[in-house]
Amino acid sequence: MWRRVASVSHLFSHSKSTKFNQQGASTFKIWETFTSESEIPTPSKGSLFVTFVLGGPGSGKGTQCAKIVEAFGFTHVSAGDLLRREIASGSAYGSVILSTIREGKIVPSQVTVELIQKEMESSDNYKFLIDGFPRSEENRKAFEKTIGAEPDVVLFFDCPEQEMVKRVLNRNQGRVDDNIDTIKKRLEIFDELNWPVINYYSQRGKLHKINAVGTVDEIFEKVRPIFAPLSK
Ligand SMILES: Nc1ncnc2c1ncn2[C@@H]1O[C@H](COP(=O)(O)OP(=O)(O)O)[C@@H](O)[C@H]1O
Ligand SMILES: O=c1ccn([C@@H]2O[C@H](COP(=O)(O)OP(=O)(O)O)[C@@H](O)[C@H]2O)c(=O)[nH]1
Ligand SMILES: [Mg+2]
């Protein structure tokens, strides 16, 4: 079990050498070329499987993650939720995290990666959805260095800005960053820092770009085939 080992990085480096992880990336590359499900072997249970979930604020990452969890049994690790939990817990980093989120900026990688690592270590699962991370190339490199792994799959929910702004302003979860001024800053930061990450995974053949306009169920029907080779 994950929590019984001293460090996740050990497991990641081990898992890198497993049959599944050597085949994982190419398996999903094949999916992009061929649409037949039979082309994809079912990955063996127990090998670590990491999915990064990217997209601008309000693109529907969290909403789709809940559907993926339900259908495919992933553990949902939302970087934003972990940071908000850290603020609520009264941690020493809390006030810095709060002001960073309020300004729509990105929390230092060291803080976020450590929270993600702890969350993964405390889970018995081997399938993880890392939601809203990495938000920058620096985030991406810090994850790789600390955890010692790359994602198997990267989802990118592609949504027009106008739609994202509308959704965020209607989100109604009492978040300090769901106001028009912070949203504008978040969109600027997304354009500047997240696109390089998206392009990086696109070049590596790991990116699955999903049009995020439509009903929640319509969008999930585009997500579902990506995970079809995974059993729950
Ligand atoms: N396909 C959709 N159509 C309309 N509203 C949506 C859709 N998906 C999510 N929402 C709503 O938009 C808001 C933002 O969704 P959320 O999943 O929190 O996005 P993100 O995590 O990318 O910021 C939420 O209020 C959610 O209920
Ligand atoms: O890896 C992360 C994830 C989130 N955040 C901060 O937390 C905010 C909210 O992130 P979340 O993913 O919850 O927002 P969403 O995109 O889902 O609206 C971001 O704007 C950032 O300020 C961050 O700094 N690093
Ligand atoms: Mg979210």
Image (spheres, helix red, strand yellow):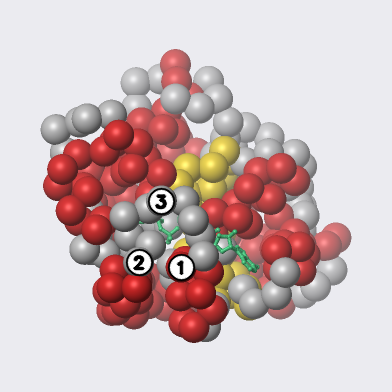
Q: Which residue is tagged 3?
A: 174
Relative depth, front residue between 225 and 66: 66
What distance separates the C-alpha of mark 3 from that of mark 1? 10 Å
Q: Earlier in the sequence, mark 3 or mark 1?
A: 1
Secondary structure, mark 1, is: helix
Judge from the rendering whether residue 57 lies leftward or rightward of residue 214; answer left or right: left
Figure check: 144 above or below 31? above
Alpha-carbon span between mark 2 and mark 1: 6 Å
* Residue ID at (63%, 48%): 66
Badge 2: how crowded within 10 Å, few (<14), some, or many (20+)? some
Number of the label disc, if any, that sits on residue 169: 1
In this rendered view, identify the residue nearer to me: 190 or 15: 190
Q: Secondary structure at mark 3?
A: loop
> So how many labels did they put on this image?
3
Q: Residue at x 55, y 25 (%)?
A: 124
Residue 66 to residue 137: above or below:
above
Give percent across and percent down for residue 94: 20, 39
Quadrant housing the C terminus: top right
